[in-house]
Structures are given as C-alpha cells and as structure tokens.
Amino acid sequence: MTLDQIKPGNGGTITAVRGEGALRRRLLDMGLTPKTKVFVKKTAPMGDPIELALRGYMLSIRKDDAANIEIEVTADDTSATGISG
Amino acid sequence: MTQALLALAGNQNSGKTTLFNVLTGSNQHVGNFPGVTVEKKVGQIKALKEAALVDLPGIYSLSPYTNEEIVTRDFILKEHPQLIINIVDATNIERNLYLTLQLMELQVPMIIALNMMDEVIQSGNSIDTERLSKELGIEIIPISAAHKQGINELIRAIKKMLKQPQAIPKPDFCTGEVHRALHAIAHIIEDHAKQNEYPLRFAATKLVEGDQVMQEALQLHEDDIHIIEEIVRSMEHALSTDREAALADMRYSYIEAICNDSVCRLQETYSQQRSEKIDRWLTHKYLGIPIFIGIMLTIFYITFSVVGGVLQEWLEIGIEAFSEQFSLLLSNMHVSTWLHELLINGVCSGVGSVLSFLPIIVILFFFLSLLEDSGYMARVAFVMDRSLRKIGLSGRSFVPMLIGFGCSVPAIMATRTLSSERDRKMTILLTPFMSCSAKLPIYGMITAAFFPSHTAIILVSVYLLGILVAIISGFLLKKTVFQGECVPFVMELPAYRIPAAKSVILHMWDKAKDFLHRAFTVIFAASILIWFLQSFDWQLHYLNDSSQSILASIGSMLAQILAPLGFNDWRAATALISGITAKESVVSTLSVLTQGNDAMLTQALPQIFTPLSAYSFLAFTVLYMPCIAAFAATKRELCSWREALLTAAYQTTAAYIVALLIYQIGSLFL
C-alpha cells in the first residue's frame, strides 16, 4: 500500500520510495528513507496535501507524491505516534 | 590583517536567522548571490571584528536540484570560508545532522551550534553533546539563539578554531558496497578533483549519487564517466537499491546509530506539543480557511485603514508641506521656472507620492515577519496549496498574491521567501494582476461617469477579471516559459515559536531601506523623465500647457495603437503613460488634460469614452504593467532588467488583448 492511502491517525513503515529526479531526492533528503516509521497526522482542509510525522518532526507533502512511497502497516505501527521514539 | 570569512549553514527553521542576528546585530547587509535571486546576507560578528559572517540559505541537503543548495555548495567550495558554523536544531536532530554529514564532506573546518538545547532539556529529554561531538569529530556548542545562551562559548570556540583550525575527520558512515564504489571512483577522479579544486571525498560522493553538476564540473573523460557508471551500477545491483536511495539511507542509518548512543528523546518538546494544540484550530478541516481569511482581513484592515492609512496621510501632508516650503524657498532664490517646476512637480511630487507608500510597506512587513517567523506561513501554504496547484504554483505563493490586492510593491518584495526560483518568478509576474488599492480612484472615476447605478457589479467584475487573467496566464506560463518539473512541494511544518523582536525589526528595516533606496534611484529617475516628457516639446521648449508636450505627442501616437480598444484619444493614452508613475495619476492626468477639476471630469469623460470603451479602458488599467515602484521591485527581485521588462511587456500585452476582446466583442452586441 502507498502512503496516500493511509488514513489520518494511522502510520506504517516505509519499504520503498519510487519516482525520480528532484522530487524523489527531496523525499529521501527529508528522511523518508526505507525502514523509517511515518505517521499521517491530518489532511489539509481542501483534502490535499497531507501532514506527516516522522523522525521527530512534521512534514507536509502532496498526495500525488505520497503515492510514490510504499508503506507496510504492521500491528504496532497503528499505535505509533511517529513523533517520539 | 585580512578578514576571516565565516559561513553560517543550516536547515530552514533551525533558528539560523536568529543566530545570525544575535552574532552580527544590525551590522549586516542583504544582497543576492551572483546570478541568482537567492538572498545573501553578510554581517560583522560583533565580538569578532576581524570576521565577516555569511548567512547561507536555509537548506536540507546539498543536492544539485535547487538554487539554494547549489549556491551553498558553490560558496563553500569557491569562496573558501575559513570556518563553517553549522546550526543544528536539537529538537529535530536527526534530520538536521543529515546536512551536517554532507557539509563535513566539503572538508572545511566546522563547529556545530546545537540550537534550542534549552527546549530539549526543559522537556526532560537530553543530548550527550560530548559523546556526539566525539562520534562526529566536530566540536559542538549547545546554544539557545532565541535566549542568547551559549553565544559567548560559541564565539570563544570560533576564535579558537580561527587560530588553530582543526581538520574535519572523514565521515565514516560508508560501509560495504558504497565504500568500495567511493574508493574506486576517488581513485579515477583524483587528478580531476585536484585540478578543479574539489575535495576528493565530496566529489566522489556526488558522483556516486549521480550528480550531473559535479560530473560536468570535473571535466571527466568519456571513458571515465563510463567506468564510473559501471561502478555505480554494480553497487546498485549489489545493494538492490538505486544510487540516491543508497546514500540517503546510509547517512540516515549512521545518524540513527550515533543518536541512539547520545540522544535521549522521551517525549515531544513543549513547543511541539503546543504546536499540535494550535494546529487543531489553525489547520482544522472546516475552520482552517476561515481563520486564515480572518487573519488576513485583520492585517489588511490594520495596514490600509487604521495605522498605515493614517500614517500615509500624515506623510502626504508632511511631503506637501515640505514641497510648499521648498517651493517658497526656490521662488525667493529666483531660480528659473523650469528648474522650479522640475524640483517641485518632478522630484517632490514623484518621489513624494511613492514615499507615502512607506508606512504601508513597513507595517505590512511587520505582520509578514510575524506570520513567517511564528511558523504560520507554512500552515497557510499547507491549507491553501490545493487552490494554486492547477496553475503550477504552491500554497506558498498565496500570501504574496493576496497582498497584491493591497499593493503590488510589498507583494513582490514578499516573494523573497518563496523557496523555488520558478515559483518566485511566476508569482512576481502574476501578482500585479491582483488589482491594487491605488487603482480604486480610477474605478471610482469611471463608474461615477458611466455606470453610476452599477458600481458594485463593475467593481467586482474588474477584480474578477484580474484574477481570471492571472489564472489563464498561470496555465499558459506553466505550459510554455515555466515548463519542466516544478520544485516539489515537500515542506516542513515547523513548531510554532514566538518571533524574536530583533528579527522582526531587522526585517522591517531591511525592507524599508530597500524601498527607500529604490525610491531615490529608479523611481527618482523615472519621475524626472516623466516630468520632462510632460513639460517640454520636441524642440525642448519649456511649456505651460502640457497638451503640446512630448508626452502628449507620444500619447497621440499611442492612441492610434489603442484605437482598436475603443479609446482613440491622446488624453486617455497620456493618462495611461503617466499611470506608470503611480496608478492614481491616471485620474489626475485625465483631469488636467480635460482642463477641469474632479467634479467636471465626470462630465468631460463622455467626450473621450463610450460606456463600452470606458469599460475596456478599465480592463486595460487593471492589467497593464504596474507602477514604477512595483516595476522597480520586480527588477530588484528578478535581478535582471531583461526579465523585468519582459514581465512588464507580458502584462501590457495581456491588457491589450483583453481590452481588445472586450471592445470588439462588445461592439457586436451594443
């Protein structure tokens, strides 16, 4: 499943970051690397972009771009807040 | 003694500007990096007179994709600063250290200023700075830039480093396949790196990452490029991932490992917890947008009606009184009429009318700094992003465009905070389509004369027309001039913080200085030019009656070009030209040229316009190039006369086409 499909309030672990060029590099640079836990905080009022919590900070990306990020949801991810730990 | 050059580098929102202001005080000046519109601030460190500090743009990485990142690496590689001060946000240490690792590859002596340590400790978390320092091999000074803690220690460390520079250890985060690839590539490019003065390790890493800019800079042979590609391919194959992911992953893994040992993070810091609470309202699903509109309306109300309006009036009165006294003085000195006129009607009234914008600009930038420094601007971008995406912009452009409804000058100046050059250029071009408040007298004049019973509809239609043209232009530009990949919208939502008074005041001062500088250069020159054209004929005779002037004859020529738009009249054309000095002078010029006062203007206008051509004239005034003050701001922000002139040409062409369509299509029906 991809990150754009995760409902606000849930999270998972990144397994792959697809795409290419500047966007992909930017996502990687911002810490969206494989094995990273990421948590979807909320959706913007107009339904896009989304707010993520990862590595102890908040990041906003568009849903189209989030669709490049493969996520694996495991049982303990659903309770993770992403911000601590 | 020659001055030492220091560079301040760090992530956005890491408190970099606050630290810069603390270290340099008001002792700084702002410019642009050569060739690009990336802001470059240079200051003298207060306690260290022999050192100049350059505030590099806030960046997250040293990738070759954004101007800010390229500027940073070029600056460090080409200007050879003696020392990098790397500011790291302790509350967000993992992502901040990602840049640190890349800076280390540049092999320039470095100190880490670990900012917001007070917040980490207050929240019951901790960072073992000694241990972390040992792991990285770089001195770490815990500071709090906002509370001026640790600054003396930082300055002492800087002094020590300048006296006895410590070499940077080679970061040892690379293992296995990547290490092998780096080693092999380093071997191939060693001579090229030395010749072109690049640190070997940095150059090799960039080549592994597939960095085109570096590949060209090193002037490698075809064969070498081929071999390097092979090495990287086999690395990718062995790791079963690609080059960029491999390195990012490795850096972050290394950071995680060292942070595990030295960072104890039990909970979110207080400001992070507070931010979450504030965001429950400010980015709320239903309340987010209304709250944003409310905030902007309040800012507009205070800026244009309450404080700014009053100050502007006072300033106008002051300028008028000054020019009266000055005029009296000139009369007493018996200077010739033309010089008198030049100084009073050219210089004083030209520069004066522009100067009266100053209070509005200062107050608007006071609020803008608050929005930016508090962290709310990122939320605006988050909330409004979707509305601008279709025309190829991001939510970041929303605020400058909105300010455009007040005044294009601060709106264009506000685009400085946009992180992408493409977005900035496009926003600068589209913002003047937002009808500014100085155009209101024109709408008032036309509606009073032609549409007295439909004022509201006409006004709304004119504003909508501007927005519509901006949207269409956005689509057009996205498909043509600004083609290509737009800079991705991947934006940090920083924790809300109380803005530092010093930063806000310095920001206001910067913008005021910038504006004053332009008022006395570009705008000054333009005022004199327009005055000259208005006061002399082609034989350079000084005139009392401007209907014989050069401007009027240019107006007559222009009138023929404007004829298809419905206003084949030299007075209308002349008014449009003088509207370039300031939009409200369209009204005063028309009133002078129809030899009447404002009251008689209403009666005189039907000699020039029909209702249809009056509306076409309105459409033209909304869209054509902005006033000289806004044009000067455009030139300043674009850093190029050519691009500024092209922008003005585009806007004027758009105005021509729209007015033409309105008049010609309208003529079929009316």
Image (cartoon, rainbow, N blue to C red):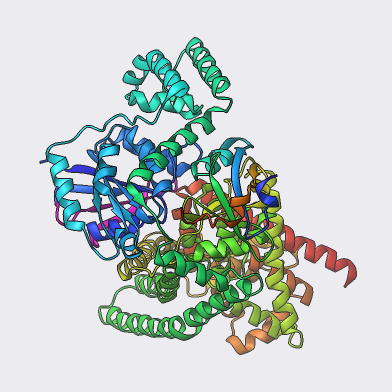
Magenta segment: does it hold B39?
Answer: yes
Q: Residue furthest right?
A: B669
Q: What stretch is highlighted in magenta?
A: B24-48
Q: Residue at x 47, y 79 (%)?
A: B303
Residue B435 placed where, x, y %? 61, 70
Picture quarter containing residue B587? bottom right
Q: Residue furthest left?
A: B1
Magenta segment: does it hold B384?
Answer: no
Picture quarter containing residue B625? bottom right
Residue B51 placed where, x, y %? 18, 47
Q: Which of B215 and B451 is in front in this view?
A: B215
Q: How many labels does the image show?
A: 0
Q: Residue at x 64, y 81 (%)?
A: B445
Residue B532 placed where, x, y %? 45, 64
Residue B275 placed where, x, y %? 47, 67
Q: Which residue is drawn at 24% across and 63% down?
A: B148
Quadrant, the C terminus of chain B: bottom right
Is residue B650 placed above or below B361 in the rendered structure?
Answer: above
Q: Which of B7 and B354 is in front in this view?
A: B7
Q: Is residue B95 left or right of residue B395?
A: left
Is residue B445 placed above or below B551 in the rendered structure?
Answer: below
Q: Which of B333 and A33 is in front in this view?
A: A33
